[in-house]
Amino acid sequence: MRIMRKLTCLIASLALALALSPAGLAEGKPAVNWYEVFVRSYQDSDGDGIGDLNGLRQRLDYIQDMGWGGIWIMPVMPSPSYHKYDVTDYCAVDPEYGTLEDMRALAADCRERGIQLIVDLPVNHTSTRHPWFQAACEALRQGDAEEPCVGYYNFSQAGGTGFVPLEGTDWYYEERFAGGGMPDLNLDNPEVRREIEEILGFWLVDVGVDGFRLDAVTSYYTGDEAANIGCLRWLKETCEAMKPGSLLIGECWENLNTIARYYESGVDSFFLFPTAQAEGIVAAATRGRKPAEKFAASWQKVLDAIPRGLLTPFLCNHDTGRTVGLVQGRSNPEMVKFAEGLLGTLNGSAFTYYGEEIGMVGSGDDPNKRLAMYWSDDDMTEQPPGATQVEYAYPSVEAQLKDDASILRYVQAVNRARLAHPEIARGKNTFLLAEGSLCVMRRDLGRTKCLIAVNFSRKDEGAIEVGEWRIDGDIEVGDGRAALDAGVLILPPLAIVILIR
């Protein structure tokens, strides 16, 4: 069955879309395709079963060939936990992952290749084993509330919600991530801010990274959005003064309108949670009735809410269930591919979690979402502590590299299409068609423009009159191939096609 549509008019919001769509970003900054890596589960270089920085360095050829121009690594600082979000020393590398020289070498390798590198920075809290906290606790047990480190945290004798009793005293300390051994820092303390300035400078200037992923920014001052935004503004201004062009991306796990308000801080971007997870824009549109209309309406809301600033859409990360689960794709690789392809059509810098390119699975307990990268049957790290479900729905990287129809090759094609057509990521968006299962977007970047045609249908071909536009790239999930016939674009099921004039 074929569905026919004409590009005879724009959707009602065309004028608004042209006025509010984000302007093109400076060429090459930031990268349009990003890759999130959990170092522990990625690549082991020394045979101890734990992924490390030198292992990541060994995979830079792979990352670059896949089309990722930026890497976000989860925390690498010393920590008592496997995930390392509870830091004991902000200016060091956990010995499990290697040395500071290994980290500097990774930054240098990335810089030489033109790959941007950002590190995860959790400054909302430290570990209970951090020397600051240890000194504060010892002082309070000795009755010395004047010890400077006591002021580094939020101690109280009143207690209350979000506070934990300090054993051996009548004091409580704030810990919003309950049970994690992660006491909140007092970010109003000038001494704490001076410490953070040194930490920022260490990573930006000494180590040579390009910026930070800022963890848990809505918890800096729990329940006080204005204070959170003010602190973020200070972080951005501080980084910019140290290293102009530093990239900061915050984790603001909130709804669209809240995320939009956080851009007032001047921070470059905040992860676009409305695109992610089972109810996010991509999965919900794919599963729903009239998917093209649902997708267009949802994405236009994003463009209207955040008319300026970098968008960073993603499908999943280390805290969420993986894409295979959210699109019910365990035995349906076509849906997994299409979700990755639809992510690739979005404006901004798209983020892909490691293992998504081979259809890794994971849900429930956090370690299940952070399983070992499946390079081959003979090349994997140990699984993270606490993993209760270890399974792989699709073949290894080694196998998928040999299969032109694999999920990996599809994700590679999506990344390369975004690199070949910067207007996809950086151009102004206009919806030309959004009806039933067919959607056409136009992206304008200066004098360069393209169309992105999408067929959401799993079984029906689509036909769209496009006039003088011609196919410059197609991303197919099946054997069908898009074609042009006398100005009519034929779209196979679940096809995404790029056209130029």
Image: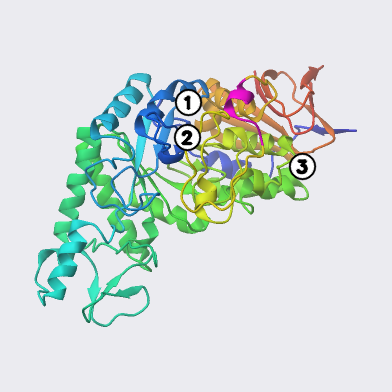
Q: Position of residue 484 (x, y in %)?
A: 78, 18
Mark 3 highlights which residue?
435
Q: Which is nearer the eye, 386 or 434? A: 386
Q: Disc 1 residue type?
A: Ile
- Density class for disc 3 (Cα within 10 Å; few <14, some 14-19, many ≥20) is some
Label at residue 35: 2
Q: Residue furthest right?
A: 1
Name the residue located 39 percent from the left edge and 66 percent from the top edge: 179
The x and y percentages for residue 419 are: 52, 23
Q: Quadrant of residue 431?
A: top right
Disc number for residue 63 = 1
**Type of residue at label 2?**
Tyr
Q: Residue at 24% across / 30% down in the picture? A: 101
Q: Quadrant of the C terminus?
A: top right
**Main structural element of the magenta stretch: helix, strand or loop?**
helix
The colouring scheme, among rainbow, by chain, secondary structure or one colour, is rainbow
Query: Disc 2 vs disc 1: Cβ atoms closer than 8 Å?
Result: yes
Q: Which residues are magenta?
A: 394-401
